[in-house]
Image: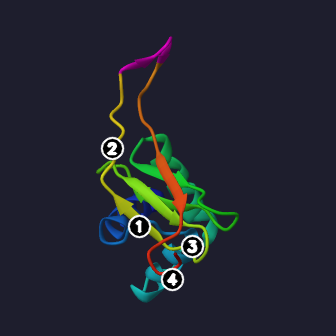
Amino acid sequence: MAEKALKLIIVEILKQNHLLSVAEFLDVLKKDGKSYNKTSVYRALEQLISEDAVCQHHFSSSEASYELREHHHTHLVCKKCGKIQTAECHYHETPKVGNFLVEHHHVTLFGLCENCQ
C-alpha cells in the first residue's frame, strides 16, 4: 500500500516539476514532510516506467532524470552548461519503420544554449 501511495505522490510531484533526479525527488519529499528512502523511490519509479506513466532520461553521465509521459516534446541539452530546455517535437511517428513497430520515441538535441553560444 505504501508503494502505491508513493507512486501517486511521485506522479503529483512530476505534474509540478519537469525532469527530476531521485535526489531531487527526495528533497521535494523531505520539504513536504514525507520520509521515503532512495530505494523506495527507485522502486516506485521503475514501476511507473513499466506502466508507461514515466520516462527515464540520461542526458549526461550524472544521475538519470524522470518525467511524465503525458506531453510529447523534444529536449534541448546545452553541452557547455547542462541546461535542459523543451521544445515542440518536430518528429512525427510513423506506425512502422521497416518491420519495426514504433510505440514511443525520445528526441534529444545537443548543442549550445543562447547564453553559451
- The answer for how far apart the CA atoms under marks 2 and 3 are is 22 Å
- Asked whether the residues under the numbered discs 4 and 3 touch, taking CB atoms below 8 Å apart as contact, a structural biologist would say no
From this view, report whether residue 73 is shown above or below residue 30: above
Residue 68 % position (x, y): 37, 55
| Foreground label between 4 and 1 | 1
Residue type, label 3: Gly
In the depicted view, which residue is nearer to us: 93 or 104?
Answer: 93
**Residue 85: image tag:** 1
Confirm whether residue 22 shows in the render.
Answer: yes
- The answer for how far apart the CA atoms under marks 2 and 4 are is 34 Å
Label 3: how many Cα within 10 Å (few below 14, some 14–19, many 20+): some
106 sits left or right of 69 in the view: right
> Pointer 2: what residue?
90
| Foreground label between 2 and 4 | 2
Residue 1 % position (x, y): 43, 57
SS at mark 2? loop
**Residue 96 magenta-highlighted:** yes
Which numbered disc, 2 or 3, marks the residue that appears first in the sequence? 3
- The answer for how far apart the CA atoms under marks 4 and 3 are is 20 Å
Q: Which residues are magenta?
A: 95-100
Residue 74 % position (x, y): 40, 52
Which numbered disc, 4 or 3, marks the residue that appears first in the sequence? 4
- Asked whether the residues under the numbered discs 3 and 1 touch, taking CB atoms below 8 Å apart as contact, a structural biologist would say no
- The answer for how far apart the CA atoms under marks 4 and 1 are is 22 Å
**Residue 82: image tag:** 3
Residue 80 % position (x, y): 61, 74
From this view, report whether residue 96 is shown above or below residue 51: above
